[in-house]
Amino acid sequence: MEVPDVSLVPEAFLRIKHPLRDIKKKSEGIASCVWKGVKREYQSEKRKEVNERGKEREKERRRRRRKEQQHRATLTEKVEKIRAVQLSAGFLHLTRTSLPSFPELVAIADNNASAIDKVTSRRKKKKKKKRRTVSTRCFSDRGRKFQSIM
């Protein structure tokens, strides 16, 4: 902030005891104009900062939306695949029960069944191997259990 030239300020203005308080009250004069100018500059800088923050937030929102849309697209693809498999399973059931007279349909259904098997086999978890234990004979004696190794 530039210091105003004192020669331009009227003598009566320089004799004021509380210049800041009176500057705010006073609407005319050099000091009040300087005050207003500084205030205006400060407000414009603040506005610029706020606008920049708003632009950054908007960019973030757009990025998030894009990611969400991509995620949704992949999810819908997966769901469509699963539904196709389920439909083919239903088709297989129909062909096996009510349409045995069309061998082509049965063949298609069999192919779909093999595809279903592949998909479901991927989903199944591996079973834990059971530990081999020593064969024991349990017999109760008044509610207590005793194990005797054979």
Image (cartoon, rainbow, N blue to C red):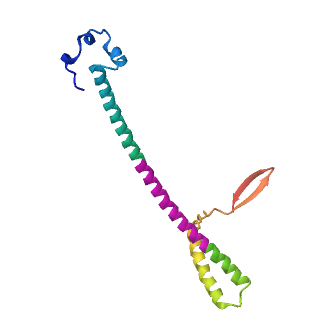
Q: Nearer the viewer, residue 15 or 143?
A: 15
Q: Nearer the viewer, residue 5 or 52?
A: 5
Q: Is 88 displayed left or right of 48 in the figure? A: right
Q: Picture quarter containing residue 115?
A: bottom right
Q: Is 146 displayed left or right of 17 in the figure? A: right
Q: Nearer the viewer, residue 130 or 9?
A: 9
Q: Is 71 displayed left or right of 16 in the figure? A: right
Q: Main secondary structure of the magenta part?
A: helix
As drawn, 131 above or below 86:
above
Classify the position of the N terminus by image quarter: top left
Q: Is residue 125 magenta?
A: no
Q: Picture quarter containing residue 136?
A: bottom right
Residue 13, how many percent across, how many down? 27, 12
Residue at screen point 46% across, 57% down: 67
State which region is magenta. Answer: 58-84
Residue 14, how many percent across, how many down? 25, 11
Classify the position of the C terminus by image quarter: bottom right
As drawn, 145 above or below 41:
below
Residue 128, how many percent across, how many down? 59, 63
Residue at screen point 79% across, 50% down: 143
Residue 65, how many percent across, how many down? 47, 55
Residue at screen point 71% across, 88% down: 100
Residue lying furthest right in this view? 142
Residue at screen point 68% across, 90% down: 102
